Image (cartoon, grey):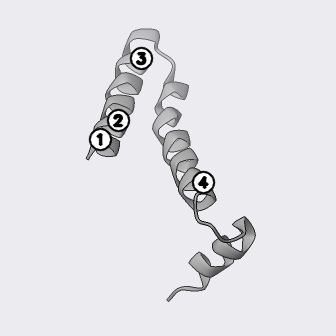
């Protein structure tokens, strides 16, 4: 639940920054946050990193 709130805060903050600063690059912040979160969750799996990634992409 707390993760969803953090991502919502990042999204709202990036939209506000985009409107205030007139720089659309701030809209990429939520994308990078999600990529970082997924990478962190994969790294927390006790198996080796690349073996875990290979397992995730082999699921059907």
Q: At 53% from the left edge and 56% from the top edge, which residue is drawn?
A: 41
Point out the residue furthest to the bottom here: 60
Mark before the other along the chain sequence, 3 or 4: 3
| Nearest-to-viewer mark from 3 and 1 | 1
| Nearest-to-viewer mark from 3 and 2 | 2
Residues at badges 4 and 1 in contact (C-beta under 8 Å)? Answer: no
Point out the residue furthest to the front here: 46
Q: Quadrant of residue 36?
A: top right
Q: Which residue is mark 4?
A: 39
Residues at badges 2 and 4 in contact (C-beta under 8 Å)? Answer: no
User: Up-down: is 21 above or below 9?
Assistant: above
Q: Which residue is mark 3?
A: 17
Q: How far, Cα to Cα, is label 3 from label 1?
A: 22 Å
Q: At 57% from the left edge and 76% from the top edge, which residue is drawn?
A: 56
Label 4 secondary element:
helix
> Dot 2: few (<14), some (14–19), or many (≥20) neighbours within 10 Å?
few
Point out residue 18 in the picture as x, y percentages from the top left corner. Answer: 43, 20
Q: Which residue is mark 2?
A: 6
Point out residue 26 in the picture as x, y percentages from the top left corner. Answer: 50, 26
| Nearest-to-viewer mark from 2 and 1 | 1
Mark identifier at residue 2: 1
Q: How far, Cα to Cα, is label 3 from label 4?
A: 25 Å
Residues at badges 2 and 1 in contact (C-beta under 8 Å)? Answer: yes
Point out residue 19 in the picture as x, y percentages from the top left corner. Answer: 37, 17
Mark before the other along the chain sequence, 3 or 2: 2
């Amino acid at each position: 639940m707390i993760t969803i709130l953090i991502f919502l805060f990042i999204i709202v903050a990036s939209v506000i920054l985009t409107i205030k600063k007139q720089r659309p690059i701030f809209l990429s912040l939520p994308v990078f946050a999600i990529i970082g979160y997924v990478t962190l969750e994969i790294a927390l799996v006790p198996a080796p990193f690349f073996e875990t990634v290979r397992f995730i992409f082999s699921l059907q």
